[in-house]
């Protein structure tokens, strides 16, 4: 623990050397790590992450999409971080009694990262499966590193770099992401959730989880029989319908299912014989709260309509605009950005590049977006890039705009229900507080006072779920109220 603490502090010290007061004096205890100063700051940060291992590689990868926090030269360097490491021998990571469940299991993995490795295998029933195994001691390393990282950030919270990059918040998000990733029972649950969703979405195929062989450290799933997307594109002609089906599927995930694959790159997508999209690796899954889903719908509609007023309204609802921001200037920048996107020829549109430009504009105005929203925006950017890989002339707005407009009334109705119920509960709480302070009133007056909040709650519930019954209920309740008052 002490050795690891020294290693992390020494590495991070020289990583942010220029931003630390009296750094030349304070550097003496960490002299072994001074070699990092040979490199320019962006490369220094990337090398520091690689030297510190899995936790910091993941941290660097998180920051590699956060151009709202870091300058482009840092983003470019962090994108070089690779999460692939040599695999461990199979017999050193699998329990011996576990092997009896298989007719065969391939020694060489089909994928290996710093957290887990995946092997192809065959059950005794003849069914082909993929076996994902968490590497030993990963959890211990991650928990130790996170604990140290939080301690360091607390000690150095006075530094501007810690505040500007919101490093405390990032550390908490990193902890959640990594602990989720090393708990394969959560990934299995997500797979099951998407499997149920795929029953409503004919273009999506999700491999089956073999529950009796899966646990927190091992995940066994049906082996996907399909062609990797990149290989499929090389072998087949461009397919407009397939591209549109993919985008519709992701839109439905985001805006209707409110749950989406958080790492949607071509390597995690296969095409089946029936031209379904088979998705793998559900280590990162985005979940949207009702409020976030509603705000993002508004934001997306603003982008499709080229309306900066709607976009700024959505940002205000998400609560990411800093105080004293120049709203007119922000709207002008948004309009310039949208003009740049909409007026480009198809051949020069790079959705992911535009995504990073968008986050860079946010950094200019000190707008820091929540991690779930950045993951979502990255997913949307990947979606358009993948659609254009399948069909180069694909453009997102003509497909997304009518879909959002069709969906908007449903969102408005759902939002109205939620707000009505929340308001009813708030009024009930407030009136109950008033009632508790008026115990000296007569029993009849108490009954009348208690009846009023009950009626208001009832109005809210009826308005939310059965609006057609609202008028008859008002008439009946008003008559009842009168009788109680006069009795």
Image: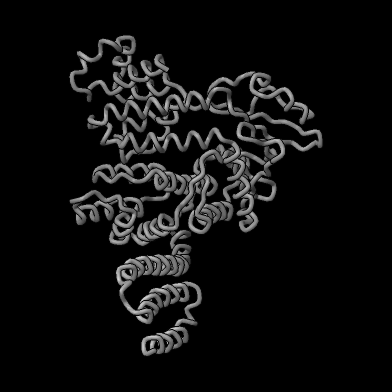
Q: Residue at x 31, y 77 (%)?
A: 441
124 relative to 310 in the view: left or right:
right
Furthest residue toward right:
125
Observer-nearest residue: 110 or 94? 94
Q: Is residue 111 visible?
A: no
Q: Is residue 60 above or below residue 470?
A: above
Which quadrant of the structure image shows residue 317?
Answer: bottom left
Which quadrant of the structure image shows residue 282?
Answer: top right
Q: Is residue 4 visible?
A: yes
Instruction: Find residue 396 and report its horizontal and vertical position in percent.
Output: 45, 54
Q: Is residue 340 above or below residue 215?
A: below
Instruction: Find residue 23 and report its horizontal and vertical position in percent.
Output: 21, 18
Instruction: Find residue 191 and report its horizontal and vertical position in percent.
Output: 61, 45
Instruction: Find residue 57 and report its horizontal and vertical position in percent.
Output: 44, 27
Q: Residue at x 39, y 43 (%)?
A: 371
Q: Residue at x 50, y 34 (%)?
A: 179
Q: How is the image coloured?
A: one colour
Observer-nearest residue: 67 or 275? 67
């Amino acid at each position: 623990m002490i050795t690891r603490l020294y290693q992390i502090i020494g590495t991070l010290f020289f990583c942010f050397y220029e931003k630390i007061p009296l750094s030349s004096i304070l550097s003496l205890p960490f002299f072994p790590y001074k070699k990092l100063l040979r490199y320019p700051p962006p490369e220094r940060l990337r090398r520091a992450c690689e030297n510190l291992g899995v936790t910091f590689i993941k941290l660097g990868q998180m920051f590699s999409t956060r151009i709202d926090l870091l300058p482009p030269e840092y983003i470019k360097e962090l994108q070089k971080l690779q999460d692939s490491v040599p695999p461990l021998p199979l017999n050193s990571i699998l329990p011996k009694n576990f092997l009896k469940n298989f007719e065969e299991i391939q020694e060489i993995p089909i994928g290996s990262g710093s957290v887990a490795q995946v092997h192809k295998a065959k059950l005794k029933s003849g069914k082909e499966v993929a076996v994902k195994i968490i590497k030993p001691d990963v959890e211990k390393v991650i928990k130790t590193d996170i604990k140290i990282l939080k301690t360091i950030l607390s000690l150095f919270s006075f530094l501007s770099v810690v505040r500007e990059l919101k490093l405390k918040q990032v550390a908490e998000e990193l902890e959640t992401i990594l602990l989720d990733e090393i708990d394969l029972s959560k990934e299995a649950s997500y797979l099951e959730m998407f499997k149920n969703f795929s029953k409503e979405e004919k273009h999506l195929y999700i491999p089956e989880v073999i529950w009796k062989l899966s646990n927190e450290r091992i995940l066994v799933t049906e082996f996907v029989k399909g062609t990797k997307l990149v290989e499929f594109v090389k072998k087949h002609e461009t397919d407009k319908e397939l591209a549109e089906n993919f985008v519709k599927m992701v839109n439905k995930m985001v805006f209707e299912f409110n749950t989406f694959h958080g790492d949607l790159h071509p390597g995690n997508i296969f095409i089946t014989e029936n031209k379904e999209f088979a998705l793998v690796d559900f280590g990162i899954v985005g979940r949207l709260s009702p409020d976030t889903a509603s705000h993002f719908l508004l934001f997306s509609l603003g982008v499709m309509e080229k309306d900066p007023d709607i976009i700024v309204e959505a940002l205000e609802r998400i609560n990411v605009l800093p105080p004293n921001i120049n709203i007119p200037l922000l709207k002008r920048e948004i309009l310039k950005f949208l003009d740049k996107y909409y007026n480009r020829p198809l051949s020069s549109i790079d959705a992911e590049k535009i995504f990073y430009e968008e986050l860079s504009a946010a950094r200019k105005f000190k707008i820091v977006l929540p991690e779930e929203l950045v993951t979502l925006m990255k997913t949307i950017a990947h979606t358009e890039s993948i659609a254009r890989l399948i069909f180069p002339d694909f453009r997102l707005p003509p497909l997304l705009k009518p879909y959002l407009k069709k969906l908007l009334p449903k969102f408005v109705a759902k939002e109205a229900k939620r707000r009505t119920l929340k308001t009813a509960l708030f009024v009930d709480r407030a009136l109950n507080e008033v009632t508790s302070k008026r115990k000296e009133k007569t029993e009849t007056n108490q009954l009348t006072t208690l009846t009023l909040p009950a009626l208001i709650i009832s109005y809210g519930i009826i308005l939310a779920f059965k609006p057609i019954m609202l008028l008859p209920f008002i008439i009946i309740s008003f008559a009842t109220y009168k009788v109680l008052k006069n009795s």
